[in-house]
Image (cartoon, grey):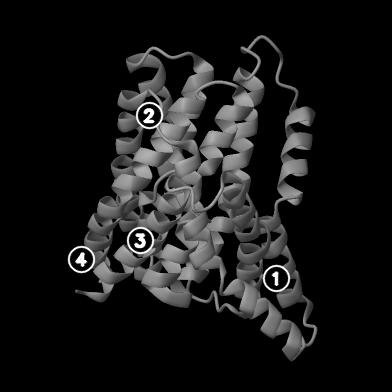
Amino acid sequence: MSPLTETVLFVFSLVALGYFAGLTGYLRPASGEGISDFAVSVAMPLLLFQTMVKADFHGVAPWPLWGAYFAAAAITWAAGHLVTTRIFGRDARAGVVGGVSSAYSNVVLLGAPFILGIFGPSGFEVLSLLVSVHLPVMMMASIVLFEMFGRGGDEHVHPLRVLRSFLRRLFINPLIIGILLGLAWRLSGVPPLPRLVMRLVDALANTAGPVALFAMGLSLRRFGISGNVRPALALSALKLFLMPALVLAFVWLLSLPPMTAKVAVVVAALPSGINSYLIAVQFNTGQALASNQMTIATACAAVTTAFWLTIVLHVFG
């Protein structure tokens, strides 16, 4: 078994273990919520803080990376919206859910441990650059569309209300706090953290990968599949094939460095995360669609991510 295949199987086996722990009743649903909270609010922010403090970002081109990734995300989001509304006849609010489900990669619970396992610390540094803007950009787009369609489109979108909602959600997000604190510490020029503190940070940060993957599996069991299978399959196809293909084309056209290009394509090929479901809950529409799409896409991703990994290794070495 090649190291690449072994790593892919290891990552998705941890997701499967979490799923079966919930399926068999070995762990209660409340346990899954607690594990997810620990992964997102403690372990992952500390891993991002650690990366910001220690990383060497020389040679990584953030603006072309961001441009390639988010151009593909915008096109895929529009395609998901159109598929949901024009082909499956859902309203505009459900179209927003379809769009975000097609374009919002699971960069935290699945992406962080996956990229770290495949590409190591240098790949995770590239991922950190994406995470630092992925959350704000996708959050802003979701909030704007929520203001436009969340109330049926009959109210004027007030820019200050959108900005206030965006900033409130942004600066209470533990991942953003971890990134900003790490950057602040790095740029301040203060002495390194005491040895005991760094040991604590490292110990908790090292749990982020396996805990996040296990929590992802528990989440899939909690949401499950309930109707809307055909649109969920269509949106999953957009997420797992259209978006990474677009990112691959853009990073190749922009001649991005090989590591940057590989990480961008693999992140685009990841399945949708829980944020698409949370947006559906916020809209009070399309909850089953988002839940089904997340579950189906994650199950299929065990095969499709291996396919895209093979492609990027062939193209970029």
Q: Dot 2 corresponds to which residue?
A: 79
The amino acid type, in three-letter code, at marker 2 is Ala
| Crowd tier of the residue under label 2, counting other residues whose Cα lies within 10 Å: few below 14, some 14–19, many 20 or above | many
Q: CA distance from mark 2 to mark 3?
A: 31 Å
- Residue 289 vs 265, above or below: the answer is above
Which of discs 2 and 3 lies nearer the camera? The answer is 3
Callout 3: SS: helix
Q: Dot 3 corresponds to which residue?
A: 13
| Crowd tier of the residue under label 3, counting other residues whose Cα lies within 10 Å: few below 14, some 14–19, many 20 or above | some
Residue located farthest toward the top when viewing the structure as drawn: 154
| Crowd tier of the residue under label 4, counting other residues whose Cα lies within 10 Å: few below 14, some 14–19, many 20 or above | few
Q: Dot 4 corresponds to which residue?
A: 314
Mark 4 and mark 2 residues within 8 Å of each other at the beta carbon: no
Callout 4: SS: helix
The amino acid type, in three-letter code, at marker 1 is Gly
Q: CA distance from mark 4 to mark 3?
A: 25 Å
Query: Could you tell which of marks 4 and 2 lies nearer the N-terminus?
Result: 2
Query: Could you tell which of marks 3 and 1 lies nearer the N-terminus?
Result: 3
The amino acid type, in three-letter code, at marker 3 is Ser
Q: Residue at x 52, y 76 (%)?
A: 58
